[in-house]
Image (cartoon, rainbow, N blue to C red):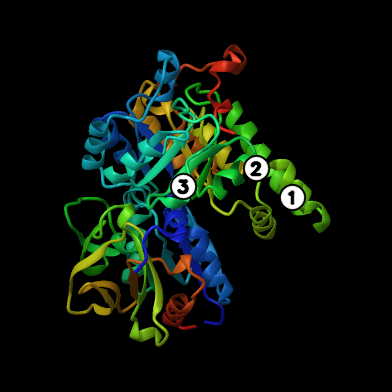
Amino acid sequence: MEQGTIRLKTGLAEMLKGGVIMDVTTPEQAKIAEEAGACAVMALERVPADIRAAGGVARMADPTIVKKIMEVVSIPVMAKARIGHFVEARVLEALGVDYIDESEVLTPADDRYHIDKRDFTVPFVCGCRNLGEALRRIAEGAAMIRTKGEPGTGNVVEAVRHCRQVMDEIRMLCALPDAEVPNFAKECGAPLEICLAVRNEGRLPVVNFAAGGIATPADAALMMHLGCDGVFVGSGIFKSGDPAKRAKAIVQAVTNYKDYALLAEISRDLGEPMVGIEISSIPDAERMQERGW
Amino acid sequence: MVRPCVGVLALQGAFREHAAAVTRLGAEAREVRQLGHMDGIDAMIIPGGESTTMGKLLVELGMLDPLRQRIENGMPVYGSCAGLILLCREIENSTQPRLGVLDATVRRNAFGRQVDSFETELDLPELGLPPFPAVFIRAPVLTGVGSRVRVLAEVRGQAVAVRQDNVLATSFHPELTPDTRLHRYFLDMCGN
């Protein structure tokens, strides 16, 4: 019997595909998310929009919050550790969370190294803005990838940009003559053997979700059309007027993202969406997507 | 039936892998996301994923009762992990929607959380030798089965693979390994 294998880690991500992972900060919110059909929840102390508003240093959530959320739902529970903070990650693993998000939403703890994720039994998901970043995280042991977007903005433009960037680079890598692949690997800063695996399969070797700015069922469906395997919704649900209804609509939108009549039906009367932020109004230093490398 | 059309329930979960497995074996795979997609399918696979998510979507999309009807009328069905849960009559400590066509009681997350997930080589006499590579991810087990249910494999004394006439169910994920014997076995159930 074997545990903590890469197949088990990537396998759980495969089971999440076509689903919605929702940020929750209380057991009550976790129940609402589960009831709405979330395939997993992300246990947090504050959603990204509130982290952005509060400023200061954002850290791993209090284990009490994570534990309480794990007790009330039967679906997988994820939690965030700071970039490079392998002790926060060990604490979350000891708590028994099902997935760790090494996340730019929290303040990075290491300015040079991400966590060596290969050494853990629990699987990790990491953010990326381009193919090189995705493949570096996979080389470190990430079993799932998500595009970063710009968290806590309710503005989908950055999620779209990062998703298109990754897909463009995959297409480019697949079209290159063999002789040019090593240089491609060097320039995007990713190991050659993982570049070759992507080239062979025509896709990332792990599941890729969209994240960072998804606020409506149409946003979620858009990301599925662009080739994502599922979506994370952070502030978009519990910062909106009717979280239960919106959550349920987003779950439906991800499953039937090509049925526009159905999307029209489920997009009706969802109440106020979260207030959005125009990206150009955010100073460079406050852009979460710039964290990590 | 020369080339069966196997529906793969694609509401959520690892449907792509199941579709790839049956396609490799020469069957036609069709993703089923709505009621209308069930027209013309000869069999159905319910993949691993999140059983509560799939159950709710089956209800909201009006698919739960029609699918149950098809299975009760003899359509072969195979459920892995979450699919097994949805097939069971009883789910411990849960009122979640289900098909309930398999006369068995299931315990969800029976081995624990993700850190307790495991891979093992499973004795599955129906598939012959060598043992079957079985991937258990937050897997369920059957804690009780009715008299019509044949247990095909066990882990720690509890059923993890069963068959009841046209219903096949496993708590593990053959779609995540290259071994296609279990999908072959299911296609044989489809009269192929």
Task: Let me know if residue A269 appears in the view.
Answer: no
Residue underneath mark 1: A173
Dot in front, 1 or 3 = 3
Nearer to us: label 3 or label 2: 3
Residue at position x 33%, y 73% from top? Answer: B167
Where residue A192 sits: x, y (%)?
69, 53
x and y percentages locating residue B58 in the rendered image: 37, 52
Amino acid identity at mark 3: Lys
Please state, as top left, top right, bottom left or bottom right, where the C terminus of chain A lies in the image.
top right
Q: Is residue B133 left or right of residue A173?
A: left
In this rendered view, identify the residue nearer to me: A20 or B26.
Answer: A20
Which residue is at the front of the view, A177 or A230? A177
Crowd rating for badge 3 (residues with CA inside 10 Å; few <14, some 14–19, many 20+): many
Residue type of the residue flagged with mark 1: Leu
Q: Earlier in the sequence, mark 2 or mark 1?
A: 2
In contact (CB < 8 Å): disc 2 and disc 1: yes
- Residue linked to disc 2: A131
Question: Disc number at residue A117?
Answer: 3
Rendered position, B27 above or below B95: below
Q: Quadrant of residue A225?
A: top right
Disc 3 secondary structure class? helix
Q: Residue at x 48, y 39 (%)?
A: A231
Taking depth in this image into account, of B75 and A208 the one nearest to the observer is A208
Q: Residues within 10 Å of mark 2 (few under 14, many from 20)?
A: many
Residue A66 position within the rendered picture, expressed as x and y whole percent measured from the top left: 28, 35
